[in-house]
Amino acid sequence: MKFAIRPNPEAHEGLNGYLMRVAYLGGWRRISDVTKLLQWSGKANFSRVYKDTCNDLLLTAAPALLKDASQLSEALITTCDHPYLYDENRMIQDIRVDYPRVCFHCLAEDKKIDWRWSLLPIFQCQKHGSVLQDSCLECGYQFKWESELLERCPACGSRWEPLATKPQPVTESQKYVWSVFESSKAPSSHVKGWLRDICLSTLIAARPFDSMYQKIGSIPSSVRNISNLVQAAYSQLIDPLYQNQWKERLFEERAVLASYSNEASLYSSKYLAVNSVTEWPLSTALLSPNQVGFNESEVFVKPVRRKLMKVCDLRYQVTNSHVAELLKLHNSDISILVDAGVISPINSKSSTMVQLFDLLAVYKLLESIPLNENLKSIDTINITPKSALLNEYAANFGQLIADVLSGKVDGVFSKAGYLKEISIDRSKLMPWLFSQLKITCENSVSLHTAAAILKCSERCVLQLSKSMEIQLAKWGGPGRERVDGLSLLAHKLPYSA
Ligand SMILES: [Zn+2]
Ligand SMILES: [Zn+2]
């Protein structure tokens, strides 16, 4: 078959935009009507096609359009082959949005869709500066890939000319992102970092009061008003006014944490500062903070976390390392506290990597730890995670916390809600340290640990083994030597008595 009207691809038209125009000119409603007529057997989400699928479809379409398939491919392949479309290290890995986003001015003038309008970081038309829309401003209809869209709203029939939003100056950050997608230059690490930042910021803008952010494949197709969300993301990165308002709102929304720590209240804003790779230029934002707003959407949260909503509010779900950071402990301390039953993960996963905790519950537990002001003997030592004595006896601070809490060791926490410092009588501490050392020395010990225990260098440990004062463990070759635990203990004991 041959189509009666056979348009050429226009500059910057993508595969779905072109097929939509073919459908429009031929009087068909959807892209799938065209592919059915072509008897194309493939299946595709036309917003996010792979290069092979695109070429396969164009090979089928070319004869009906009286075109050369390779020329069609050359004109349209950018949509699925641009180097910045996908990055597995980005918080939003694919920046293509599923549904059409359009400039009403352009549609009124040209009836064609620029493929770059579908890219998440772009929210303004390059020519008119108007904000790209994914829903009808008149009736709220959410756009799909329907050919009528090129002319008017498929739901209420409003034509685009009178609806066209006010042209605006194009912001600096938008000029930059347009220049990135203007040509397909070799990918630069600066642009990659820049895109990672804007994707991270978008995810945070979608969950402004959350405690953790996890990678997603693409923007969920149920999310609309993307241009607003992305503007919030830019504002988060570049607008001091927005940043201040966000922090104020964070304090309000996470007020329940305020009595524990400001750091915990403001955690979301810190996440952005820590993970952002690019220096962001100051630039004027298009909308005021009030206009972009601070709304949270659950669909940006992974289903495994959403399932835990009944156990714990999404906002306070945190990882092991997050708890460690806020309590100023090491990750391994948290694992020990979990093993000792002091704190429990809300998803009861055995692997530390996937455990989640309820931050509020952790803080409440700290609050419940009694303070004993009475223990102030002359020979009291304050132990913190950095105390040298812990290294010398291969002891773990988390274990000390657990043992103090369970009453195995007679120590006290020096401040309420603060696990980081334990006061303990020297006569009680030393037996506990020895018991920890003995446990470690039941097995072979790494050179590094042995050096810490003997308070000398690793070279000195090897020398001691040559002079037979300690023995090396049977396994481990040159460079990977381990020390026999019992011989180490025997050597250590006379010196530490
Ligand atoms: Zn435009
Ligand atoms: Zn409408």
Image (tube, rainbow, N blue to C red):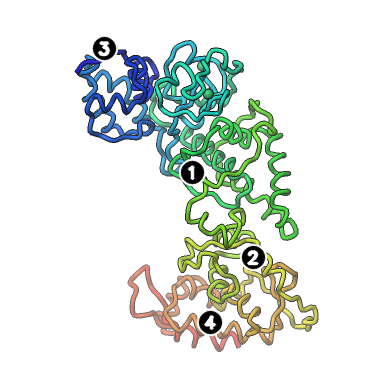
Residue occupying image coordinates x 51% and y 63%: 355
- Location of the C terminus (image quadrant): bottom right
Q: Secondary structure at mark 3?
A: loop
Mark yes or no: residue 127 visible. no
- In primary-sequence order, the first of circles 3 and 1 is 3
Q: How many marks?
A: 4
Q: Nearer the viewer, mark 4 or mark 3?
A: 3
Q: Nearer the viewer, mark 3 or mark 2?
A: 3
Where is residue 80? Give x, y as percent. 35, 30
Pick the residue in front: 217 or 393.
217
Q: Secondary structure at mark 4?
A: helix
Residue under numbered circle 3: 4
Q: Secondary structure at mark 1?
A: loop
Q: How much space separates mark 3 and mark 1, taking CA atoms?
A: 45 Å
Is the C-beta of the residue carrying label 4 under 8 Å from the nearest atom of ligand 1?
no
Residue under numbered circle 4: 437
Label 4 neighbourhood size at 10 Å, few (<14), some (14-19), many (20+)? many
- In primary-sequence order, the first of circles 1 and 2 is 1
Is the C-beta of the residue carrying label 1 under 8 Å from the nearest atom of ligand 1?
no
